Amino acid sequence: MSALLTVRSRLDHWWVFVVRGLLVIAFGLLTLLWPQITLLVLVALFATFCVLDGVTSIISAVRRKDWGWHLIGGILSIIVGFLAIMWPASAGFALVLLIAAWAIMRGVLDISAAISLRHELNRQLEWMLIISGIVSILFGAFVALWPIAGILAVVGMIAGFAIFLGVTLIAAGFRQRSLRNRLGPTTTAA
């Protein structure tokens, strides 16, 4: 009986999933409505990460009395963070170009892996790797050639993911409520 009450008490909180889903959908829609703000927030997060990473690296280097690459890396990280804060548009542009370069390199590496492992992979897996590599290269080239569209594509992917996640959470919440209703009313043991 105690296990049933535990399950029931968990199912009584079905609404949490629905609220989370609605919040995520709202985030996704706001991301679509204000892509510039979304990009600015991404740049701000990147800048914050760089500064904190740099401070952490410098503290570690000073404590270890390591005046080499660790210290230099920390200083460079702080400089990049402050540059991103001072010129967020340039930082956003650079971030998009970095995504493009990563996508192209990833695609080339996937195709190379498919070719080098072709004797160990079955044909379907080999072609799936090649196709994923080609798609990645095409995406990277698209973003590199049209960075403004690339920015919007990245923001659109974030928004699409958020909306999809929100719908999934809402569905999970209503599924949980349905299971709760099947169990019947809560009973308390005397």
Image (cartoon, rainbow, N blue to C red):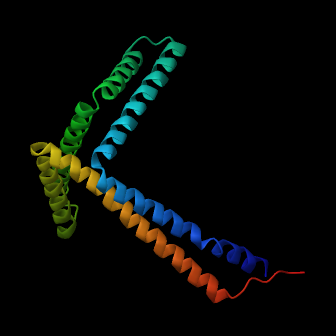
* The C terminus lies in quadrant: bottom right
Residue 47 picture location, percent across and down: 37, 31
For the residue pair 37 and 79, the one nearer the viewer reads as 37
For the residue pair 92 and 138, the one nearer the viewer reads as 92
- On the picture, is 132 further left or further right than 13? left
Can the viewer see residue 26?
Answer: yes
- On the picture, is 20 further left or further right than 75? right
Residue 138 picture location, percent across and down: 12, 53
Residue 43 picture location, percent across and down: 33, 37
Asked where in the image residue 82 lies, by quadrant, the reply is top left
For the residue pair 169 and 26, the one nearer the viewer reads as 26
- On the picture, is 5 further left or further right than 40? right
Residue at the farthest front position: 33
Residue at the farthest right position: 190
From this view, report whether residue 68 is shown above or below residue 158. above
Residue 3 picture location, percent across and down: 74, 77
Residue at position x 18%, y 53% from top?
136
Residue at position x 52%, y 69% from top?
18
From this view, report whether residue 128 is shown above or below residue 176. above
Q: How many numbered badges does the structure rendering display?
A: 0
Can the viewer see residue 109?
Answer: no
Residue at position x 20%, y 52% from top?
110
